[in-house]
Image (spheres, helix red, strand yellow):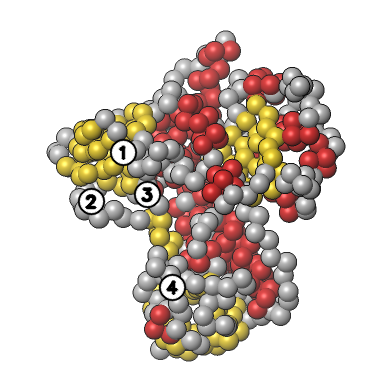
Amino acid sequence: METIHTQLLVLGAGPGGYSAAFRAADLGLSVVIVERYPTLGGVCLNVGCIPSKTLLHIAQVIDDAKALNSMGVNFNPPQIDLNQVQSTKNAVITKLNKGLANLARQRKVQTIFGVGRFRDPNCLEVHGTNSVAINFEKAIIATGSQTIHLPGIPDDPRIIDSTAALALTEIPPRLLIIGGGIIGLEMANIYAAFGSQVTIIELTPGLIPGCDPDLVRILHRHLANRITIHLNTRLIRIDPQPENLIAHLSGPTGNLILHGDRMLIAVGRRPNSANLALEDIGIALDQRGFITVDSEQRTTIPHIYAIGDVAGNPLLAHKAAYQGKCVAETVAGHKPAVADIIPSVAYTDPEIAWVGLSETTAQQQAITFAKGQFPWMASGRALSLGRAAGMTKLLFDPASNRLLGAGIVGPGAGELIAEAALAIQLGATARDISRTIHPHPSLSETIALAAEAFQGTITELYFPKKG
C-alpha cells in the first residue's frame, strides 16, 4: 500500500469538506481530500440541493403559468420531456463538478477517490482503484449524512428515496410521500407540478416539524389546493401488488388504505459515521451516531475535527461550508470569528425561511420576546404578483429592541431571510431596520414594515389606539 503524508486530511468532499480543503490550501497547508464518490460536491451538489432546485425551478414556472389564468393570460398545458429535463439538471451538476475539480487543481489540493477508514489517530487507509495510507498531522471529518431507511419496508423498486426521486424517469400518476418535512414537501411540489396526484403522510400534527405553526399554516393552505395531506398519520405497512402499492395507515379517524404507483420515503437523515473506525481510535459519538465536538468542532481527539451533518443538527449545506472555513483557519493557526446565526429554508411553494430565535423555541425555553409582523395581503408587490398569502415576522428583545429572530413565508422567502440574518449578526434594532430605506414596491420592504409594526410607527396598517 502506497503511503503519503499531508498536513491536513479532509474526509468527505461535500460543501463542508471542499470549503475546508480550499481555505486551508489558501492558508498555505498541504491538503489531501478523500471522497468515496467519483466527483466532488457531496450529496448537496450531486443528489440534493442543486438538482432539486433545478427541478423546483421548472415546477415553479409551470405553476406560475397556471396561476396567470386568473389574471387573463392562458397557456397550453406544458409538454414535459423528461429526457431533456434530466439532461438540463445533469448539465448543471456536471458544470459545478468540473468547477470544483478545477478549483482543487488550482490550489494543488490532492484528491483521492475511495472509501476511507482510520487505521489510527494519525493515519487513514483509503481503498479504491488504488489503495493508499495517508499519514496526517490534522484531519477534518466531513462525511455528511444519508437517508433514513424505515424498518420493515419491502424491497420494491417503486419505493424510492430522494435520490431516486430526483432521477425522474417517469411521472407516476399517484405518488405517496411518507414524511412532511422539507425534503418530502419539495418533492411534492415537483411531482404535483409535473402532473402526479400527490399524497403526503406525516406522523406529527403539522408539516415541517419544528417550524413555527403560523408560518406553516400559510404553506399548508396553499398546498392543500393541489396535494392531499394526512397529519397525525402513521404508516403501518406497505403491500406491494403487481399493479400498485397499497399503504396501510393509522390516522385520527382510524385505519386508512391508500393506493399509489410510487412511494417516496422522506423521514429524515442520519450521519455517515459508521464504518470509519471512529470509536476504535477514540472518537466519541452520541446515541444518534453524530460525532461529539466542542465549540471549535474538535472531536475527543484534539487534532481531529468534525463538521457539517456528521457533527449534528441542523443538517444544512451552508452550515457545513461555514464550519469548514472556520476549522481550516483554526488548523492554520488563526482565530476565526465563529457565528451561529444559521438560516433555514424550505424551497416549497410558497417558500418558508427562518433564522435565529423562533416563537416555538422561545415558548419552549420561556424566552421573553416581542413581535412585529406584516401580512403580505397589505403588500403592493405581493398583490401585483398574485401572491398575497404570505407573512414576514420579526422577534425582538423587548428590553433592547434588538432583532432576535425572523420568519418569512411567501415567494422568495429564501432570498429575503438573508437580510434578517445579517441584522441579527450585527445586533440591529427595530429602529435600525425600519430606518433603512427599502425599495418600493418590493417584498424586501415587508421586513422594514414588520419592524415598524413592532415599533407602532407603521402607516401601511392601522392599529386602534388602546385605552
- Circle nearer the viewer, 2 or 1: 1
* Residue 222 percent across, percent down from the top left: 49, 26
Residue to which mark 2 is pinned = 153
Return the residue at label 1: 233
Left or right position of 292 against 410: left
Q: Earlier in the sequence, mark 3 or mark 4?
A: 3
The amino acid at mark 3 is Val
Q: CA distance from mark 2 to mark 3?
A: 13 Å
Disc 3 residue crowd, few under 14, some 14–19, many 20+, Cα 10 Å: many
Rounded to the nearest angstrom, the CA distance separating label 4 from label 2 is 27 Å
Q: Which residue is mark 3?
A: 267
Name the front one of labels 3 and 1: 1
Task: Single out the mark in the foreground, 3 or 4.
Answer: 4
Comes first in the chain, label 3 or label 1: 1
Where residue 203 sits: x, y (%)? 35, 42
| Mark 2 or mark 1: whose residue is earlier in sequence | 2
Q: Residue at x 21, y 34 (%)?
A: 255
Q: Position of residue 181 (x, y in %)?
A: 44, 44
Q: Which mark is residue 285?
A: 4
* Disc 2 element: loop
